Image (cartoon, rainbow, N blue to C red):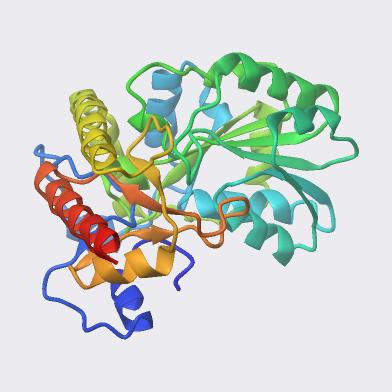
Amino acid sequence: MRMHGANPEKVFESFGIPIPEKILDFSTNTNVVPFLQKPKIDWWSIIGEYPDDECISLRTLIGDQEGVEIEQVMFFNGSNEAIYQMVSQKPNGKAALLQPLYGEYEKALKAYNYEIVDLFSEDKIFQLEHCDFLFICNPNNPTGQVMDNQKMEAIARYCQENKIILVLDEAYHYFLDYIKPTSHWIKENEYLLILRSLTKIYGLSGIRLGYCLGHRRRISSLKATHPTWSVNGVAQVLGMAFLRNQNYLKETKSFYAEERIRMVKEIKSLGYKTQPTEVNYFLLSVKNDEEIIRFLLEKSIVVRHTRNFKSLDGKYIRIAVKSCADNDCLIEALREFNNLVKKD
């Protein structure tokens, strides 16, 4: 079974099920709200010229929006690139992961020969010693839960005092329908790096675009080892077009806040149990993940298994919130599966 969401064709192949003409992919968490303001772009000019290797326009825009200096902002070819670059600066170290969380951290850490400590409780963080990194997803991927700012700030302060670099992954930050400000912490805390992704909120999976907020000295250190022209020109132009449109963010937050509640309520009414979430995906408790995944595949529906998330171990499937019509298709399929299980 594929370890990552998206690329649904490979899931069908792994189960030996013919690939249907239309696939409803609930395994990937990208935004389904249409972006109607199509940017007017001279594509050939962008393709034929070298991109701005400093990403000045993007960094200036984010600096203004977040209230930080441009020197505290750095763009990457997707936030995955940032993860690998961070750990490559100090190989053979020790890092802690607050589980469950996105699997790319562990992959990057193993590539650079890190000792990895898995934590399954927020309170265990305050016992960490002699550690180089702590990785936290907030909002969490895969659960969708959000740690409150008071506890998050206490963790950031503890890491600063103990010289542990806290990598706070906020890839789904833009989906939250309330303000959760954290960027102002980087002004005084040299041991905090905040990761943001534009891939999920703007549906830019194909071009890869993300950024990092951090203390001036920490960002300067990352720049010293960053490849020139890492962020291509197309990504920069599209990033500017999307980031300038604040109305799109409002529409997205409004849609997901309402549709998530409706969808989860419908699913719960069928007798299923879901985990609390505050973003555009959630966990559904299952007794036999392979059975329900196969059933849904036969209905042309793809969901995300959780076998590779520590502490989840396949006891759940992760489901993204899609359009109202697609969500209704999934709800009906879950109703059919529920009735089938009851008969058995």
| Quarter of the image that includes the N terminus | bottom left
Q: Position of residue 92 (x, y in %)?
A: 84, 58
The residue depicted at 26 percent of the width and 82 percent of the height is 17
The residue depicted at 14 percent of the width and 51 percent of the height is 326
| Quarter of the image that includes the C terminus | bottom left
Image vertical order of residue 163 relative to residue 82, above or below: above
Judged left or right of residue 332, residue 152 is right
Judged left or right of residue 311, residue 126 is right
Q: Position of residue 238 (x, y in %)?
A: 26, 45
Image vertical order of residue 12 relative to residue 222, above or below: below
Front residue of this view, candidates 208 and 57 = 208
The reply to whether residue 337 is in sight is yes
Q: Position of residue 340 (x, y in %)?
A: 23, 63
Count numbered badges in the picture.
0
Front residue of this view, candidates 330 and 134 = 330
The residue depicted at 54 percent of the width and 55 percent of the height is 81
Instruction: Locate residue 154: give its quadrant.
Output: top right
The residue depicted at 57 percent of the width and 58 percent of the height is 313
Most extreme residue toward the front is 343
The reply to whether residue 189 is in sight is no
Q: Position of residue 333 (x, y in %)?
A: 18, 58
Instruction: Locate residue 200: give its quadrant.
Output: top left
Image vertical order of residue 242 relative to residue 189, above or below: below
Judged left or right of residue 30, residue 335 is left
Judged left or right of residue 285, residue 106 is right
Front residue of this view, candidates 279 and 272 = 272
